[in-house]
Structure formats: structure tokens, C-alpha cells
Amino acid sequence: MNNSWLRRFIKHRDSTLLVLALLLLLGAILRPAIPFRHNIYTYFLIADISQSMNASDMTLHGKKVTRMAYMQNMMHEVVSALPCDTKVSIGLFAGNSVAAMYAPIEVCKNFAAIQSTIDHLDWRMAWAGNSRFRESLFVTAKVVRDMPEPAQVVYFTDGEEAPKLHVFNTKNLEDFQGGDDWIFVGLGSEEGVAIPKLSEDNQVIGYWSNESFAMQPGIAQISESTMGVRDDNVAVGEHDRFMSKRASEYMEEVAKEIGAKYINGDSSYTVLRAMKEQKPARRDIAPLPLDWLLATLAGVCILGIYASRHPFRQVRQNLKVYRQDIKSRFFTRSEAVAHDNHFQ
């Protein structure tokens, strides 16, 4: 019985495959899909735009660049490596708060817009001159809660606290909620470099002094009106310049306090690997299209129509013809050479 069906298929193979290909193509046109549960990844990428990010202590393509330029390049590479259906929002950190540029948007459909946002990051976008990383975490958690969907935080910063923290202005993080699985990406070097003070035209007019980052503990500094106020004096000499470093140890401590993770921003690969270890923002059911599969099978059927019923026999015949052709050409050439030698 099985052999009869097989013989019948072989006899009418071409017409059978053609009908099957047409049916598969009709099915592909209908664009069928099946429900598929998959992970949804949404990221809130926060960029530190405080003035310490203007310090030039990073290396990119063999050249010294600012932390800001290095961060922009890293964010470009991270966004470029994210798969389609991933959603991204870009946030800005300055002063003691964080602001989202827009709600999370899909990376492939909005790739140019996201990359343009990163291109235009600038310290002059900051709404405050201070840098209160610890304070900003509370605002970050609120911004994430207010988003239309859950998002994982990836925070690019050097961890600089300006003015420096002391017992009176250090925020207690014991009751902090929402930092699970966040990533702090540390930027800058451990050596320490001066922070240039720039004009509105982005021209260097000096360097920040040590007094700019100093804050003496006292009742006056605890009030809301003076919280975060610092001296804007320019350093009078190299000895007076404030030396900015990547606050790796400090960010590691903060990360432990809120359940986050700290990594050095040495490469975008390190960041992407850490992001893959983050939990998905949520799980959802989405349609898995099958039209491509049906169209592929239809193509296989069409190729089968043109394939020989006896492929191995056909290969042997082709090789035999090829050998005969080579022999005939060689024999003809040998006769021609012998003929020429005879009449020389």
C-alpha cells in the first residue's frame, strides 16, 4: 500500500509539488500567526550630563576624549546591539534629579530618533550645576514608576558628588525601593583629572577649584534653600584644581544598599553582558508570524519540481559527459601537435 502511494507520488510529483506550493503561498498571504509568550525588555538609559563629564580622561580610538563623548559612543553601541522589539527611553541626570526625554520607544522603528538624542547630549542641557548622584536615585525610582510600562535602569555616570557629602547631607537609603537589578556604569579614570569650566560657547575659561566642591557641615547647609549650593570660583593655579575621579568604590557601596549592580564602563560589551543578566521588564503574549515559514516551504516545493527524479544518476551522467569532453579536447590537441611536428 505504501509503495503504491510512493509510486503514484513519483509519477505525479511535479503536479503534486506545484499544487502544494500554491496552497502554501495562499496560506502565507493570509499571514497566519500563533500566540507566543516572550520576554519584553525595556531600558531607561540615564546619561550624566553634569560638568564633571567634561573631564578628558577616557580613550576612544586611540585619542583622549571627554567622559561625555565616551559615554555617547558607548550608548550608541549599546542601542545598536539591542534586538528589535526592545524599548528604550533616554534620561538626563543633573543636580539631584533625573528627567526622561520620552517614554520608552521601540529601538528598530525609532532607531534614528534615539541615536539623534544621544548625539545631542550636552552639559548645557543641565538645569543645575551640582551633581547629587545619591539624591537622584529617589527621583529615578519615581520616574520609572510613572512610565507606562516597567523598565530596567542603566545609569551612566562617574558617581561624582558635588559638593562632597558629609553626615548632614547624606541621604539614607535604608527604605529605598525600586533599585533591584539596576546597573550603574562607572565612567572616568582612577587617576584624577581637572574639570574644565566652560563658557556658554563651550570654551574653556578655567578649571573648577577645590573650594567649588567643598561644603562645610553646619546648620546653614542643611536648609532646602542652600542644599547643594557650591562655590563657583575658578582655580587660581594647578595646585588649586579639583581632581575628579571615577567613584567606583562609592558607587559599589550605593549599589549594594539598593540591590543594584555596579560595573566599570570599560567597554560596551561589558555593559551589554550585564544588561542580558537583568530580568526582563515583563512577559507578554505576542503573535509569532508563520508566513515566512510557509513561503519558504513553497519555495522548497518549487525547487523540487526542477530537481531530477534520480539526482545521483544525473550527477554520474554529468561527470561522464564532462570526462568525455576533456578527453576529446585533449585528443584533438594532441593530434594537432603531432600534425605540426610532422611538417616541420
Image (spheres, rainbow, N blue to C red):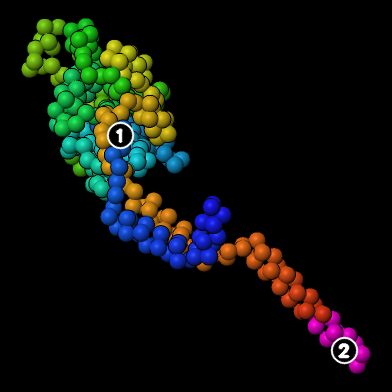
Q: Can residue 225 be seen in this view?
A: yes
Identity, as a three-letter code, of the amino acid under mark 2: His
Q: Where is residue 304 in the image (x, y as percent from the top left)?
A: 50, 61
| Residue drawn where x is 32% and y is 55% of the image | 27
The image quadrant that residue 202 belongs to is top left
Instruction: Quote the CA–CA distance across marks 2 and 1.
Output: 79 Å
Question: 65 or 198: which is nearer to us?
Answer: 65
Q: Residues within 10 Å of mark 2 (few under 14, many from 20)?
A: few
Label 2, secondary structure: give it. Answer: helix
Q: What stretch is highlighted in magenta?
A: 332-344
**Quarter of the figure with the C terminus:** bottom right
User: Could you say which disc has been placed on residue 339 in the image?
Assistant: 2
Give yes or no for residue 336 being in the magenta stretch.
yes
Q: Please identify the dominant SS of the magenta region.
A: helix
Determine whether the residue tagged by mark 1 lies in a helix, strand or loop.
strand
Front residue of this view, candidates 25 and 64: 25
Residue 144: in magenta span: no
Q: Name the residue under label 1.
A: 37
- Quadrant of res 219: top left
